[in-house]
Amino acid sequence: EIVLTQSPGTLSLSPGERATLSCRASQTVSSRYLAWYQQKPGQAPRFLIYGASSRATGIPDRFSGSGSGTDFTLTIRRLEPEDFAVYYCQQYGSSPFTFGQGTTLEIK
Amino acid sequence: QVHLQQWGAGLLKPSETLSLTCAVSGGSFSGNYWSWIRQSPGKGLEWIGEIHYRGSTNYNPSLESRITISMDTSTKQFSLKLNSGTAADTAVYYCARRVAMAGSGWFDPWGQGTLVTFSS
């Protein structure tokens, strides 16, 4: 099973700043089969990014993903108030599909 | 667009069987895998398993001995049963779609979630 480790655990930033979230895999994620989700309290996760760098339908272009192999990054440029939430990465290159433990993006 | 609505018992006693159902609306049941995922404070998000629209299943080895995922294509519903529940199975359970297409493996959309608590 591929273990995904996200860092940092918590990121404190102000609106307008840039957020950089990391997701590291215990082994290579084949074909960049990595997704990102956003979750707010009391809600189901919201799908953001697939294929490591492609935005899902309706996701603002301030969200971008990059990376390959074992190291992946989600970048949110110019944070908006609604962006403060928990973010998860997920690999779908091999079963069982696994998620990272999450990064909490909080308002500084 | 596809919408998932789930339901099931929220409070169970240890050793009882968890049973949840998810109804698909607004889109096709075909061409997809229908998944269950759970989220607990201790283990985060955990993929439980899935059923292909043609009926084959794929389970997380960590839970495989205790789970059954089934479906009813006539009603566009799929279900999860987890037996011999313990406090460690207490979590919010989500149903979700995974498109059955090469290169596709993300989960979207998700159901609203059901909190299931195992407590005596």
Image (spheres, coloured by chain):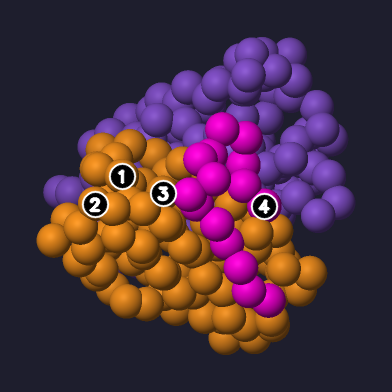
**Residue tagged by mark 4?**
A54
Q: Is residue A80 above or below residue A70?
A: above
The image position of residue A98, as x and y in percent, is 55, 66
Q: Which chain is purple?
A: B
Same-chain status of marks 2 and 1 = yes
**Residue tagged by mark 2?**
A15
| Mark 2, secondary structure of its residue | loop
The chain identifier of the residue carrying mark 2 reads A
| Mark 1, secondary structure of its residue | loop
Which is more foreground, mark 4 or mark 3? 4
**Residue tagged by mark 1?**
A80
The image position of residue B47, as x and y in percent, is 53, 56
**Residue tagged by mark 3?**
A38
Which is more foreground, mark 1 or mark 3? 1
The chain identifier of the residue carrying mark 1 reads A
Q: Earlier in the sequence, mark 1 or mark 3?
A: 3
Q: Is residue B85 visible?
A: no
For marks 2 and 3, give the CA distance. 17 Å
Q: Earlier in the sequence, mark 4 or mark 1?
A: 4
CB atoms of marks 2 and 1 within 8 Å: yes
For marks 4 and 3, give the CA distance. 15 Å
For marks 2 and 4, give the CA distance. 24 Å
